[in-house]
Image (spheres, rainbow, N blue to C red):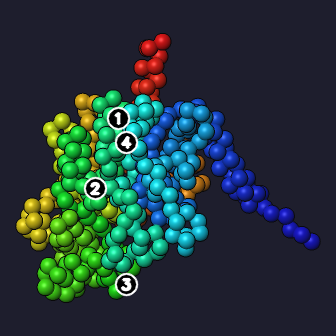
Amino acid sequence: MIQLPGKNYLFALIIIAVIPTTIFLLLFLREEKPLEILIMNKNVSSPSRIENKTAFGIINQNRIVRSNKKTYNRKKDYYGFFPLRPRRSKEFHFREIDSDAVDSLANHYDMAWFIDTYSTSMDNWHGDSRNTDTSANHGGLTLSDYLFLEKMINRNKLVIAEFNFFASPTSETIREKTEELTGVYWSGWTGMYYDNLDFTINEYLPLRIVEAYRSQSGGNWSYTGSGIILAHENGSVLVLENETHLDIEVPLITTTAGKAKKYGVIEKVHYPYRFDISYTADTMDVISYYELSVNEKGERLLKSNNIPSRFPAVIGNPNQGNFFYHGGSFSNYDLPVLAGMLRSTRSLDFLFYNDNVESRSKFLWKYYNPFVSAVISNYYISLSESAGKAK
């Protein structure tokens, strides 16, 4: 005799089936918001465009569509590096801003989002992230990029810029012009958290960092715990090892209660990934800060290199209100498609993050996603209100 499933089992199956379906329908019943966004990512390493998943996921979650009502496609609706299949062919396409098209592009687009302007090295593209060869393809901000950025900012259009916006391979001239335009200045330092500083075990720790450290210190790389590596554009490398230099191994992003409420983010969250150390002009507003929880030994090491333990993580412009700089590789996360759809219901956030300090999931769900969603939503409302007044 075949035993039928119990009532509790059937109820659980119904819940599992109904909840995602309901949320999916609610998401796609929400009003579409036409907004033309120029998205730039020069650091894409695979034909699947994984590096675009989070940014495009946020756009699609918020029902942002193109003016022709088509949804944004992470594999084709951006400027930057396009690896082509098959990967072994080493063929690629690069879509760039043409100097002759700057005016028309600035007229056409409502918003610009610079995800990553670094570049795609031949090593990263072909799977060897530890090689010391850093040859790149079409990396850095160009003069045309800068001219487009200038027109967007001067026209008070929303611009979001992220990690490596100012750093190499952008030329010094373009960097200085961009810094003056935006009011954000890069110190030359970048940082990265590693859960294991033993390069013989951690395959994600670049060998060129270890070699640079050995060269400058004349000693061995003896670090085996977790910690933060700071690297300067001049080749200098500092290591903050957990317990030796740090009381808390992972950088924190902190936000005041007022600003956290304004943007819908939590006041304190771990950020275990890439970041840069920048400072701002008086015209800019620091929305959130990084905090490196150094002990006395760590504080001495930072001070000897003129590095603060607290510095801007997210910067905005209170005068124009439409330029935001994220001092980290915030959007570089492999966002699951289902999670992206369910994000429209915040009560289900807990399904997709944990409190493990080594995980970026909580940062994505409780800070980055709500922050960018709030910024874009507020901007869209302001455009709609302006259009209504113009009628």
Where residue 343 appears, as percent x and y from the top left, is 53, 48
Tell me what residue is drawn at x 59 percent, y 69 percent: 86
Q: Taking 379 as reference, is 164 left or right? A: left
Of 283 and 122, which appears nearest the observer?
A: 122
Q: Amino acid at mark 3?
A: Ile
**Numbered mark located on residue 152 in the image:** 1
Distance Cα–Cα, label 3 vs label 4: 46 Å
Distance (Cα) linking label 1 and label 3: 45 Å
Q: Residue at x 42, y 20 (%)?
A: 386
In the rendered structure, find residue 255 and report the number of the disc placed on it: none
**Helix, strand, or loop for circle 1?**
helix
Dot placed on the residue nearer the N-terminal end, 3 or 2: 2
Determine crowd level at label 2: few under 14, some 14-19, many 20+ residues with C-alpha closer than 10 A: many
Q: Report crowding for label 4: few under 14, some 14 to 19, many 20 or more residues within 10 A (C-alpha).
A: some
Q: Which residue is mark 3?
A: 201
Which label is found at residue 99?
Answer: 4
Q: Residue furthest front?
A: 100
Marks 1 and 3 close (CB-CB < 8 Å): no
On the image, the x and y values in percent for residue 65 come to 56, 37
Gap in Å between the C-alphas at discs 2 and 4? Answer: 17 Å
**Percent x, y for residue 45?**
47, 65
Q: Which residue bears the numbered disc 2?
A: 170
Q: Amino acid at mark 2?
A: Thr
Camera-nearest label, 3 or 4? 4
Residue type, mark 1 in image: Met
Q: Label 1: few (<14), some or many (≥20) within 10 Å?
A: many
Mark 3 or mark 4, earlier in chain:
4
